[in-house]
Amino acid sequence: MGATEEALQNLVNVNVVDAENPKNIKVSGTEDSVVNDKELGAKETPIKDKKDSIPGEVKEMLKSLASEWENVVDINALQVIPLKGAMTNEVFQIKWQTTAGESSRKVLLRTYGEGTGIFFDRDVEVTTFEFMSKSGQGPSLLGRFANGRIEEFINARTLSASDLRDPSISALIAAKLKEFHDLDMPGPKTVNLWDRLRNWLSEAKRLCSPEEAEAFHLDTMDKEISALENFLSDTHQRIGFCHNDLQYGNIMFDEESSSVTIIDYEYANYNPVAYDIANHFNEMAANYHTDTPHVLDFTKYPDLEERRRFAHAYLSSSGEQPSDTEVEQLLDDIEKYALANHILWGVWGIISEHVNKIDFDYKEYAKQRLQEYWSRKTCLLGSHEYSSHDNATKVNGEQTLTSTTNRKPAKRNSVSNKLKKIFGLGFFRSKH
């Protein structure tokens, strides 16, 4: 596991949530239930000796939970099943045998990846998790320890990459995301994106060698971020509570009720809602359950019809029919914010390469995200490319951006070509 026994000897906040009221602990699940993180999806592969690596304090928490369920045959006979595909945390299904004819009892054990404190505040994330649970938006928090927590195991399946292209499922995601954005979360309701980008970039520069920093053009990224911020700040934008990591592995689907649940709120905070949708669209290029999970295929980025259908479902989920102008404006904003999203996850990959031990090629992932930024930047701006020094393209004295719904391919800039030559990324084709 990512946490050693020594690291967990000093457990803090060890508790079992609602242990005195087990009826409020929803941990039922079917044998084919799967849960996921940016992450993940899994096939059940019990590892017999894994339970021996779980620190004693955490075992006691798990046994205390199981003791509240009358149908568990033996609380000591727990199975530990790694859920593969994680990119940030290590996640395990904990399962107990129950009396004949009844579904097994399950919970989710999550141990935090090494170095992930760079990306977010764990205390804030747990507060968000608890708020989402109390509001009925996500799984329940069952217990917490120094380097992880125990969660409800949701009786649903994790979406697959192909599910995102199903129009009916996509419409459910759009409506659920609108509901998510409308949550009234405690704390300041200000845009977090730009501070996060700069903080992560500063950390990436600290961790990288001079050669690596030069290869990734990290010295120019400050100006790129400022240019994007100045440009996008001039546009009308709706701010909401955003998930910021809505890939298929963070969406659960209940077949019986045809409903979706959004899980894993590590990166969640207030941002422009167009940014959150842009992140979701960009994630359609990924399939984290292949032999090469880091490889992205941007030809799978949703086409205009798919994007328009999602935007319409999102805006109409509250019962009012949006105008064509509202839909097109949202689409335009989404395409712009996709640029910032590529920078953010590119920098995330650079940092993760240095701090995370999970088996994932973070560096190659970062290369693709940043290469796509340079590629899409040129295409979005057409022949009018804003300068990092001027912060935005000037046309007739005003800042402007070529329409994303009727754009023509543009010649890639020299930085993009240089990046592809360095990294050999010419075989990654962009839909844009």
Image (cartoon, rainbow, N blue to C red):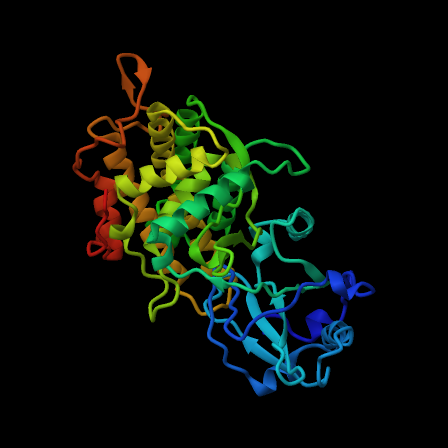
- Residue 175 visible here: yes
The image shows residue 279 at horizontal and vertical percentages of: 42, 45
User: Does residue 218 appear in the picture of this structure?
Assistant: no
**x and y, in percent, of residue 24 in the image:** 74, 60
Q: Nearer the viewer, residue 134 or 296?
A: 134
**Quarter of the figure that contains the C terminus:** top left
Q: Is residue 58 above or below residue 141?
A: below
- In the shown orientation, is residue 240 left or right of residue 66? left
Question: Which quarter shows the N terminus?
Answer: bottom right
Q: Position of residue 78 (x, y in %)?
A: 66, 82
Viewer-nearest residue: 246 or 124: 246
Q: Residue at x 67, y 58 (%)?
A: 140
Determine whether, in the image, residue 65 is placed left or right of residue 3: right
**Residue at 60% across, 87% down:** 49
Query: Residue placed farthest to the right in the image?
Result: 20
Q: Position of residue 151 (x, y in %)?
A: 65, 63
Q: Which residue is found at the position 50% from the left and 37% from the top?
A: 193
Question: 279 and 173: which one is in front?
Answer: 173
Left or right: where 395 falls relative to 189: left
